[in-house]
Image (cartoon, helix red, strand yellow):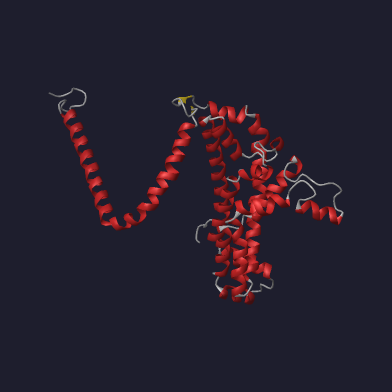
Amino acid sequence: MFDRTSRIPLNTAPTSAAAHKSKARSRVRNNARGLLALLWAHRFSYLFVAPFMLSFITFILIPVLAAIGLSFTYFNAIQRPHFIGWQNYQYLLSQDLLFLKYALPNTFQFALLVGPGGYIAAFLLAWLISQLPGTLRKWFALAMYTPSLTVGIAMSIVWLPMLTGDRIGYLNSILLQLGLIDVPKLWVTDKDYLMNSMVVVTLWSSMGVGFLAMLAGILNVNKELYEAGKLDGIGSRLQEIWYITIPSMKPQMLFGAIMAIVSTFKAGAIGVELSGLNPTPEYAGHLIINHIDDYGFIRFEMGYAAAISVFLLILMYLSNRLSWSLFGPKEGE
């Protein structure tokens, strides 16, 4: 039987649809077999990758996805999460005065001082150390790197006695003897000085793996490039750094920038450790990390703490994209 308008047999439509579905299933089956065959052919490669992938999925991917999911809920760690949509983010960006007035501005101020400051200091120190002879270079590199490993010990042995707000404190004692101040300064309990103390201590301990990566990058620059540069008219060390050293070590510069961003944004306990108070005096050292700890582990508002964590993750991602645009490989490189 034929349809009068199309002249096509009516009973062929179901048949062609079934054939199309059968072909699609066969195509999917063949693709799956091809993928399994490819995985099996490279099984030893995936076996070597498996420990990292398992760790990445367990400790990074799953917690990030869980935080994103919890950020849309009200969860007090006792009752089941209750979906509330975008309310956490609306409250965070419009009504949380503690976040808008203290945590966010303090984090930006701290990050702008410590991030670029520590990054530039790491590069300059790495370049200066690279100019030393081999034996001295090792000892100076060790001296610069060690503080990043002993932050907690150095905090209690060095910085707390140095910044004590009485005449016994090392810094106050020296400044009083020199006549630079008349009365002891409360370096870690006065809101006017706490942020500066946090920046100084963090910069002192910021020469970590990023510093070592920059030192390795500088030492691995081809010496023939400097000789060729001198023939082309480069006549100063500053020109060598700008035109040869930095372009030749962009991967290390990118790695150092990413490590500086991560370490800066995750530094939140420094204000509490220095002042001995939580929250810090008049919220002068209150950072986003402290805000997350406050809502997550003191108030047990896990959903809202997860929303703040996602906001911080977005800030770190945007900062990393900026670093990638500056030091990442360009087309043709």
Q: Residue at x 62, y 55 (%)?
A: 206
Q: Pick the quarter of the image with the N terminus.
A: top left
Q: Nearer the viewer, residue 45 or 191?
A: 191
Asked if one can make out residue 199 in the rendered structure from this viewpoint, the answer is yes
Q: Residue at x 69, y 52 (%)?
A: 159
Q: How many marks?
A: 0
Residue 24 x, y percent position in the rendering? 23, 39
Residue 82 x, y percent position in the rendering? 46, 24
Picture quadrant of residue 233 = bottom right
Q: Residue at x 55, y 66 (%)?
A: 216
Picture quadrant of residue 142 = bottom right
Residue 165 x, y percent position in the rendering? 76, 46
* Horizontal relation, residue 203 to residue 14: left or right: right
Residue 64 x, y percent position in the rendering? 46, 40
Q: Nearer the viewer, residue 252 or 232?
A: 252
Asked if one can make out residue 116 in the rendered structure from this viewpoint, the answer is no
Q: Nearer the viewer, residue 315 or 276?
A: 276
Q: Nearer the viewer, residue 286 or 183?
A: 183
Q: From this viewpoint, which residue is outermost toward the left?
A: 1
Q: Residue at x 40, y 52 (%)?
A: 52
